[in-house]
Amino acid sequence: MKKATRFCLAFCLFAVLGLSSLQASTIVPAIPLSTEQTNANPRTQELTQRLEQIRATDKSQMSASERKALRKETRQIKKALGGGVYISAGAIIVILIILLLVL
């Protein structure tokens, strides 16, 4: 009986997560950095301003090598700013399965 209850609970959980992941697949606009985050480090603020300059430039008049250099610089800046910790949907499901088995 306990095994059947766990199975039903897991099925309901996967059904809810599956539906929410379909809904979450819509495009969400980027959230601008708050002033508190940009003022935290002068170097971070400088890199953020450079990214905005790159985005604002007119790239239609640039040669292919110039555009490539800008893309490379953008990637380096984004890498220097760092990202967050991203957990895929599969990883979340695996974590939930492990939690269900342990509890």
Image: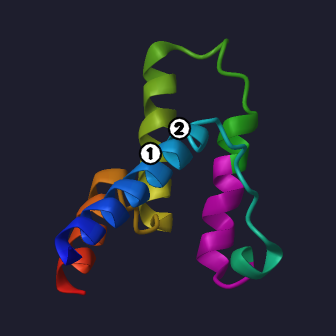
Q: Which image quarter: residue 1? A: bottom left
Can you give x and y, in whole percent of width and height, for residue 44 in the image?
61, 72
- Depth check: give the residue in front, 33 or 68: 33
Badge 1 crowding class, 10 Å Cα cut-off, few under 14, some 14 to 19, many 20 or more, is: few
Q: Residue at x 73, y 65 (%)?
A: 33
Q: Amino acid at mark 1?
A: Gly
Q: Amino acid at mark 2?
A: Leu
In contact (CB < 8 Å): disc 2 and disc 1 = yes
For this view, does 51 lie left or right of residue 34?
Answer: left
Q: What residue sits right under mark 2 in the picture? A: 22
Instruction: Identify whether 25 is placed above or below 68.
Output: below
User: For the residue labelled by badge 1, is the local secondary structure a helix, a strand or a loop?
Assistant: helix
Q: Which image quarter: residue 58? A: top right
* Residue 84 located within the stretch drawn in magenta: no
| Quadrant of the drawing holding the C terminus | bottom left
Q: Residue at x 65, y 36 (%)?
A: 27
Q: Main secondary structure of the magenta part?
A: helix
Can you give x and y, in whole percent of width and height, for residue 100 in the image?
26, 76
* Residue 43 located within the stretch drawn in magenta: yes
Q: What residue sits right under mark 1 in the picture? A: 18
Instruction: Identify whether 71 is placed above or below 84.
Output: above
Q: Residue at x 42, y 56 (%)?
A: 12
- Depth check: give the residue in front, 57 or 3: 3
User: For the residue labelled by badge 2, is the local secondary structure a helix, a strand or a loop?
Assistant: helix
Bounds of the magenta span?
39-51
In the rendering, which numbered label is found on residue 10?
A: none
Q: For marks 2 and 1, give the CA distance.
A: 6 Å
Instruction: Identify whether 63 is placed above or below 84.
Output: above
